[in-house]
Amino acid sequence: MRNFLKAIKEYGCIEVRNTPHGVIIENPKNAKSTNIPTHRPELAIWIYHNILRQLDIDKKDFEKLF
């Protein structure tokens, strides 16, 4: 989970704030944001896909870099 959060920040997204349920991340390229849950050590694959979709990040492009 922490590795994904680190990779998404390296991709260019910024951490807006912490919440009781996770971290709000924003993609500054399109001003879209979403919550990334940090209460679990592992990230379910469907949550991973939803986060990339909500931030409007191309999955293939992201996976090529990380």
Image (tube, rainbow, N blue to C red):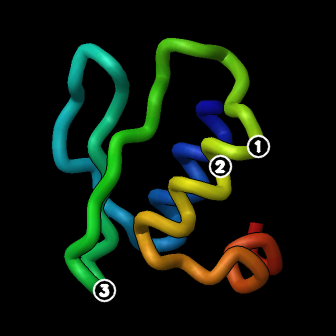
Residue at the disc numbered 2: 48
Q: Nearer the viewer, mark 2 or mark 3?
A: 2
Label 3 crowding class (10 Å Cα cut-off): few <14, some 14-19, many 20+?
Answer: few
Q: Nearer the viewer, residue 12 or 34?
A: 34
Circle 2 residues within 10 Å: few <14, some 14–19, many ≥20: some
Residue tagged 1: 45
Q: Residues within 10 Å of mark 1 (few under 14, many from 20)?
A: few
Mark 2 to mark 1 CA distance (whole Å): 5 Å
* Quadrant location, the C terminus: bottom right
User: What amino acid type is highlighted by mark number 2?
Assistant: Tyr
- Quadrant into which the N terminus falls: top right
Q: Amino acid at mark 1?
A: Ile
Q: Name the residue carrying label 3.
A: 29
Q: Which callout, 1 or 3, points at the residue further toward the start of the chain? A: 3
Q: Nearer the viewer, residue 6 or 61?
A: 61
Which residue is at 43% across, 64% downward?
Answer: 54
- Earlier-in-chain disc, 2 versus 3: 3
Q: CA distance from mark 2 to mark 3?
A: 19 Å
